[in-house]
Image (spheres, grey):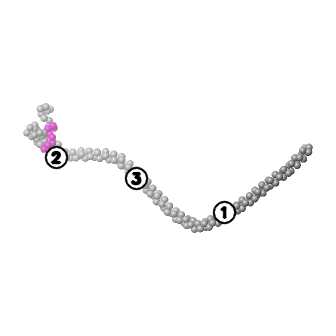
Amino acid sequence: MSNTNEPDKKQQCDGTPDGCHGDIENCDLDPAECHANSTMAKQFNPENMEDCMGKSLDQLSKAFMSSAKRWEMIVYPSLLAFIVLAGYGFFLIYSLTKDADRIADNMVHMTQDMTLISTQMSAISKNMVLMTQTVDSQSASMKEMTYHMRGMNQSMNQMRYDFSVLNNSVSRPMSFMNTFMPW
C-alpha cells in the first residue's frame, strides 16, 4: 500500500520523452523508470505492438462486419430491385421492337390497299357523276309528280263540290216526299 505522501507512478507519467511531470529537478520518480511506464515507450515494444495491432485489426474487423451487415440490408434489396427493373425494361424494349416490326409489316399491306383505293377512285368519280344525273332525273320526275298531284287535288275538289250540289238537289225533294210517306 502506498502512502498518501508518495506520488502514484501512473499519475506521474505523462508520455513525454523524459517521462515525468513538470521539470526534471523536482520530479519524485527516476526519469528512466517513468519513461519505461509511459505509453510511448510501450508502443515501441514488439510484444505490445503485436497486441495493439491484433486489437486494432479485431476492432476494425468488427466495425467492418457491422457496417457490412448494414450495407447488406440496403444493397442486396436494391440490387434485386435493379435486376427486376432491368428485366422489365428489357421486356418493354422487346415489346416495342416487336410492335414496330408488326407496324412495318402492316404498312406494306396498307400501301397496297391505298394503291387499290387510288385506282378505284376514278371509277367512284364516274359513278358519282352517274348518281348525280340519276338524282337530277328523279328530281325532275318529282316535280312532274307534284304537278299531277295538284291536278288530282283540283279534280277531287271539283268532285266534292259536285256531290254537294247533288246532295242539295236530291235531299230537298226527298225530304218533301218523306212527309207524305207513312213510314
Disc 2 marks which amino acid?
Phe
Q: Which residue is mark 1?
A: 135
Residue lying furthest left: 25
Residue 12: image x %, image y %?
A: 14, 38
Residue 14 highlighted magenta (yes or no): yes
Q: Is residue 88 above or below residue 40?
A: below
Mark linked to residue 44? 2
Of circles 1 and 3, which is in front? 1
Disc 1 marks which amino acid?
Val
Residue 158: image x %, image y %?
A: 79, 55
The reply to whether dot 1 and dot 3 touch (C-beta < 8 Å) is no
Disc 3 marks which amino acid?
Ile
Q: Is residue 93 above or below residue 37?
A: below
Which structural element holds mark 3?
helix
| Residue numbers of the magenta segment | 10-17
Quote the CA–CA distance across marks 1 and 2: 120 Å
- Seen at 14% across and 32% down, the residue is 1
- Seen at 62% across and 67% down, the residue is 126
Main secondary structure type of the part rendered in magenta: loop
Quarter of the image for residue 4 reads: top left
Quarter of the image for residue 66 reads: top left
Q: Which residue is mark 3?
A: 83
Taking 39 as reference, is 93 left or right?
Answer: right
Residue 68: image x %, image y %?
A: 32, 47
- Seen at 14% across and 39% down, the residue is 13
Which structural element holds mark 1?
helix
Quarter of the image for residue 140 reads: bottom right
